[in-house]
Image (cartoon, rainbow, N blue to C red):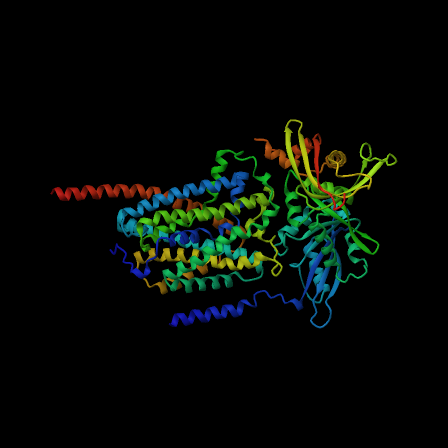
Amino acid sequence: MKQFKLIVSLLLSIVLVIGCADPKILERVGIVTLIGYDAGEEDKVTVTSVVRQVNPDYQSTVNTHTETEATGEKTRLKVNLESSKKIVAGQMRVVLFGEDIAKEGLDEMLHALIMNSEISTSIYVAVVEDSAQTLIEGQYKNVTDIGQHIYGIIEHNIEQQNAVSSTLHEVVRDFYSPLRDPLIPIVKKNGENIEISGTALFHKGAMVGEFPIEDTLYLMMVRGKFRHGTLELELPSEGLSAKDDLETIPISIDSIKSYRQMKLVDPAVPEFDLKVIVQCRLLEIHSSISTADRTIVEKLEKGINKILESEISRIVNKSIELHSDHFGFGEKYRADTRNAKLTEEEWHEIYKNLKVNVKVQSTIVRDGVFE
Amino acid sequence: MKNSLHISLNQKINAFLLIVIVNACQIGVGIHGFQRVVYQDAKQDAWIAVILSFIYAHFVAFIMIKTLKMFQDQDLYGIHQMIFGKYFGNFLNSLYVLYCSFAFVSIIINYKEVINTWVFPHLASSFLYISLLIIVIYTFTGGFRIIIGISTINFLFTLAIPIILLVPLKYANINSLLPILDNDMINLLKGVYSMTFTIAGFELINFIYPNVKEKSKVGKYVHIGLLTTLFVYLTTMLIALTYFNGEQLNKLIWATLSMLSMIKLPFFERIEILIICGWMIIILPNLCIYLWAAYRGVIRIKSISPNKFVWSFSIVIFILTLFINTRSQIEMVNNIFSKIAFIIVFIYPFILFIFALIKKLFTKRKVQNDETI
C-alpha cells in the first residue's frame, strides 16, 4: 500500500510537470505560414516569412519579415528579435523559391527543410516568377492573410490537377533520386492578383526551363493518372463537315480518365514507347457535325490523337533537350534492365539520346444531351 | 539448489496469448527506422530480406520450443542449471540477465531519442527516463498478468499501423521495387542480418514457457505470433520502399515516422506527434517483459523481492542511460546490441539444443544403467 501511494504520487507529479515540458500557447506564439527564399548577395539567402499572430482581443495580424543571412535558422533568430512573440514553424503550409535561387539550385534549402522535424512533408513547394519577396510583400485586394491565400491557390489547383502536385515529399523524393528530376509549379504576381503561370523544370536541383500553363494538361497526362482537365483543339475539317466554308473545326473535350503506359523497347538506344489512353467527353463542337454518325466520331478521335501526339512529343522532346527527366524514364529504365547499376552521370549521358515514340489512343465516351 | 519453478495457477496464461506476447516483444522501437538499415545492404530487395529473416526466426523458434519441451516446466535459466551445473549455469544465466538489461536500455534510449527529435527538442532526457521508469515499475509490480494485459492493448495498436500507412500509398511508385533480386546474395544476407535489432524479442518465449497452461499448443501460437509481426513489418517495409526514393531512404533515420508526417486529418494536422506519444504503450510491454525475464534470472542466483529488485534495477538503468546522450552514441549502442542479439537469439539456441540432446542421452543411459544394476 505504501508503495502504491508512492507510485501514484510520483505519477501525479509527472502529469503535473509534463504539462510544462514545452508549452506553445497559441496567443503567445507567432505562426509562420509561408516562407519565401531569394538569392541574396554573397551566397546568402534572403528569407521572407509571413507570420500570423493570433490575438484574443482583436483580429489576428499578419506581418512579413525579410532577413538576409547565410542559413535559414539564423534568419529565424533575426525574425525572433524583431517579433514580440516566439516564432514557430509547425504550421507552415507553403515554401516559395524565387526564380534566381531556383536557377542556382535548391539543394541546401530542401535539405534544411526535410531535416527539420517541425515541418511536415505535406507542405507545398512552388517557384515564383521574379522574386519571392515582391510577391509576398505585394498588396492584393481582399487578401488579409497572404500565406493562407497562396496556400489556397496552390492547394485547390493541385487537387483539381490544374497544376503538378508538388508536396515537399514529392519534390524531395525526386530531388534525391539520381534518375529523376522534380517538377514544381510557378506562381506569379499579376497586377493585383496571384496566379499559377506554369511549371518549372529542374536538372540536378537547379531550374533549367519552364512550361507555360497551357502545357500542364499534357504534362499531367504523361505523368500518370489524370482525371480532370478541358482541352480546346482545332481539327482540320476535311471529311467531317458538310459545309465547306470551315477550314478548321474548334472542338472542346473534357478528359474523364487518362492513364499512361511506358515501355522500354530497346535498352541500347534507349527507346521508349509511351502510350497515353484517354477517355474523353465531347463538350463543344460545330453544329453542322452530327456525332450520331459512327464514322464521324472515329474521325474525330483520330484527329484528337494526332494533335495530342504532336503536343506530347513536343513536351517530351523539350524535356530531353533541357536534360530534365521528370517523367521518370530513368526509373523505368533501371526497373526494366537487370544488372544495370546505373549512376547519375551515366543516365544523364544516356538521356540525351533518348527516343520516345508517343502514341495516343482516345475514345469519345459520350457527348452532351443533344446531338 | 532450487531447480523447479512453482507457478501457481493464477500466474498462468492461456496459450493463445502467446500471439500477443510475441508480437509485443518484437515490435518496439525498431520499426521506426529499420527500413533504412536493411535498405543499405539489400537495396530494393529489402522486403525479401524481411521475409528471409522471418523464415529463419521461425526455424529458431521451432528449435527453442523443442529444447523447452525436453525439460518439463523449466525456463531457460533452469535448463542452464540442469545442463551446465550450478556454477557455469549461473554464469550463463547472469549473461542472459545482462542481455535482457541491455535490451531494456537500448529500447529506452531509442525511444527517448525519437521523443527528443520529433516532439520535445528541449525536454531533459533524465525527465523522460524517470517518467518511463516509473510507469515500468508500476506495471511490473502489478505482476505477470498485468504485463500480459498491457501487451493485449499494444497488440491492437500495432495492428492499426498498416491501416494508417495506407494513406501514404497514394504517393507510391511501384517501379522502386524493380528489378527484383538484382543484388548479390551476400548483400541480401547482410540485409537479413540487419534485421536482428528489429526482429529480436521472440527469444523471451524461453521464459514465458513455464507460465503457459497448454504446453502442447505453444508452438502453434508462437508461429502465428511471428506471422503477425511479419505482416506488420512487411507492409511497413513495402510501403516505405515505394513511398520513398532509394537514395532518400538511405538518409532517413525514421522512415516509418516520416511517412506518417504526410497524413493530415481535418482535426489533427500532425498525426505522427500523437502516434509517437502513444508509442509508449507499444514499448511498455516490451520493457516490462525484458525486465520480468531479467528478474526471473536474478532470483535463481539470489532470492530478492520483486519490489526491491525493480527499484534497484531502475536506479542502475537510470544512471547508465545518463551516459548515453548523442545520436552517434545511440547508434553505437544499437550496433553492439545487434551483434550480441544475433549471437544470443539466432545462434545460441542451436548450441543449447545440441547440449540438451547430449544431456538427454546421458541421463537415459544412466537411468538404464541404474535399472540394470
The mark tally for this picture is: 0
Towards the viewer: A339 or A67: A339
Name the residue furthest right: A245
Q: Is residue A57 left or right of residue B171?
A: right
Relative depth, front residue between B350 and A183: A183
Q: Quadrant of the C terminus of chain B?
A: top left
Residue at 29% in and 52% down? B74
Which percent across, then down, holds residue A316?
A: 73, 36
Displayed quadrant of residue A238 = top right
Residue closest to the eye, B32 or B160: B160
Residue B89 spot, x, y in % from top left: 29, 50
Q: Residue reaching furthest left?
A: B373
Q: Is residue A277 above or below residue A36?
A: above
Report x, y in % for residue A24. 62, 65
Q: Is residue A261 left or right of residue B114?
A: right
Left or right: residue B43 compared with residue B300:
right
Residue B303 appears in the picture as rendered: no
Quadrant where the N terminus of chain B sits is bottom left
Q: Is residue A92 visible?
A: yes
* Residue B41, image x, y percentages: 52, 39
With respect to residue A241, does A154 lie above or below?
A: below
Residue at horizontal 59%, vertical 32%? Answer: A336
Q: Height in image: B343 above or below A353?
A: below
